[in-house]
Image (cartoon, rainbow, N blue to C red):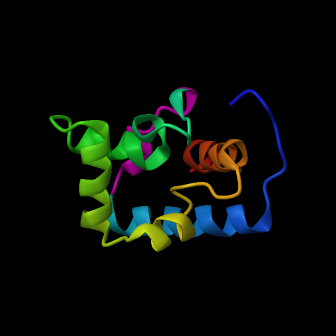
Amino acid sequence: MTAHAVPTRRILEHVARGAALLDRDLFGWRSRVDVARLDMTMTGDSLLGQVACAMFPASHPNGAYLLLLDRLGLDRIHEVSCGFVAIDGEDVELGQVWASEVTQA
């Protein structure tokens, strides 16, 4: 995440929703995220991907990610509305907001 962009209100709302879900269902999720490695374009390095890989280390990153989506009861629509996947090319902004969320709590 080298570029710095201003996040949209939608991104802020999505990340707040996703963080609340993780706070409720996955105690300690923040400790499983390496902010320096955070890349929302790569499944294994995305926020949820890093958490998933830590929880399911024997699985391939894509498989771990899908296992965690299932555990959280999320489908593809809710995956976006919880800020786990960027839309409209806003990967950098989404990653920046997640990085802030992880480090400030």
- Residue at x 74% of width, y 27% of height: 2
Instruction: Report the front residue among 56 and 26.
Output: 56
Q: Is residue 18 left or right of residue 31?
A: right
Prevailing SS of the magenta stretch: helix
Q: Is residue 84 above or below residue 30?
A: below
Q: Is residue 85 left or right of residue 49?
A: right
Does the segment drawn in magenta span residue 32? yes
Q: How many marks?
A: 0
Pick out the residue farthest to the left: 58
Q: Is residue 18 above or below residue 43?
A: below
Q: Position of residue 23 (x, y in %)?
A: 42, 63
Q: Is residue 81 above or below residue 90?
A: below
Instruction: Report the front residue among 42 and 34.
Output: 42
Q: Is residue 41 left or right of residue 51?
A: right
Q: Position of residue 40 (x, y in %)?
A: 56, 42
- Residue at x 79% of width, y 61% of height: 8
Does the segment drawn in magenta span residue 38? no
Q: Position of residue 35 (x, y in %)?
A: 55, 33
Instruction: Report the front residue among 43 and 48.
Output: 43
Instruction: Report the front residue among 53 and 19.
Output: 53
Point out the image quarter for the N terminus: top right
- Residue at x 24% of width, y 55% of height: 67
Q: Position of residue 17 (x, y in %)?
A: 55, 70
- Residue at x 70% of width, y 63% of height: 12
Pick out the residue farthest to the front: 88
Q: Which residues are magenta?
A: 27-36
